[in-house]
Image (cartoon, grey):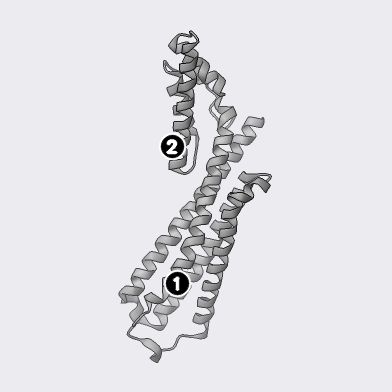
């Protein structure tokens, strides 16, 4: 099955549990902390099961092999783990968008506070159209992202397919962030065009650095969200085949 290891951990080394967990860790994709917690939990479950089998009289190696065998093959357990990791990545992406976009927009006026050009050099109509569009789209997207986060929590019980839901979230976030980032870049470009001093104005430069970092991180989360769901769907189809 493509995407899921085919080897049985009971036959690839002297420590079946260690081999099993190593392959499991190499297969899963998703948030590092959540993935590490899953791997640790799986290892503890296997170790506890092996200890119980030893208490029943099995030799240590035989007990560890039986623990791995009864835990399930990678093809059986990976799809569920990967689906959970994809959901965690989707929730993280939506949460960042819901929090970062309003904050960035609320702090934006500081970029132009006490600027040397002031009201003596008014902005063009196109500039204000773009600014208003950028602000409205930011707060609308933040509201939608908040609803998405709710969908990952209490709304998850109503989702027929959490992995596909997460994939839609990731693809939507990638598309929105790309378009929204272009609008933000246009706003800054027009600012520099109308007020050349903005190109060297420290608050403006600092603000652009913060915006770029926030958007870049959001984009990274969104791309990882798509990658996680792609892996989850591939593993699911492989398990069915």
Residue at disc 1, secondary structure: helix
Q: Residue 70 location, x and y as percent? A: 56, 20
Image height check: is 60 above or below 192? above
Q: Residue at x 56, y 54 (%)?
A: 149
Image height check: is 133 above or below 6? below
Q: Residue at x 60, y 58 (%)?
A: 147
- Disc assigned to residue 35: none
Q: Earlier in the sequence, mark 1 or mark 2?
A: 2
Image height check: is 179 above or below 196? above
Determine which residue is flagged by label 1: 106
Q: Residues within 10 Å of mark 2 (few under 14, many from 20)?
A: some
Q: Residues within 10 Å of mark 1 (few under 14, many from 20)?
A: few
Q: Residue at x 43, y 12 (%)?
A: 60
Q: Residue 125 location, x and y as percent? A: 52, 85
Report the Cα–Cα distance between label 1 and label 2: 36 Å
- Disc assigned to residue 36: 2
Q: Would you identify the image quadrant in which residue 160 lies?
A: top right
Q: Would you identify the image quadrant in which residue 232 lies?
A: top right
Residue at disc 2, secondary structure: helix
Q: Residue at x 43, y 75 (%)?
A: 189
Query: In the picture, which quadrant includes the N terminus?
Result: top right
The answer, for residue 11, to whether it is visible in the render is: no
Does 42 sit left or right of 155 as displayed?
Answer: left
Q: Residue 128 location, x and y as percent? A: 51, 81
């Amino acid at each position: 099955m493509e995407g899921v290891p085919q080897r049985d951990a009971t036959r690839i080394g002297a420590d079946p549990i260690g081999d099993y967990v190593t392959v499991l860790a190499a297969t899963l994709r998703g948030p590092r902390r959540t993935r590490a917690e899953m791997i640790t939990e799986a290892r503890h479950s296997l170790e506890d099961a092996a200890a119980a089998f030893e208490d029943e009289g099995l030799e240590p190696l035989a007990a560890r092999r039986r623990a791995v065998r009864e835990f399930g093959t990678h093809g059986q357990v990976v799809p569920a783990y990967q689906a959970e990791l994809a959901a965690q990545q989707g929730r993280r992406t939506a949460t960042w968008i819901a929090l970062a976009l309003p904050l960035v927009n609320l702090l934006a006026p500081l970029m132009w506070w006490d600027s040397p050009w002031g009201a003596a050099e008014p902005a063009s109509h196109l500039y204000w159209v773009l600014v208003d569009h950028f602000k409205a789209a930011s707060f609308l997207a933040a509201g939608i992202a908040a609803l998405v986060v709710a969908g990952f929590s209490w709304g998850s019980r109503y989702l027929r397919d959490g992995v596909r839901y997460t994939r839609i979230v990731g693809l939507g976030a990638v598309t929105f962030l790309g378009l929204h980032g272009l609008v933000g870049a246009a706003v800054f470009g027009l600012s520099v065009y109308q007020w050349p001093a903005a190109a060297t104005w420290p608050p403006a430069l600092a603000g652009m650095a913060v915006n770029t970092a926030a958007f870049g991180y959001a984009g990274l989360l969104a791309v990882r969200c798509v990658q996680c769901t792609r892996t989850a769907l591939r593993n699911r189809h492989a398990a069915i085949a």
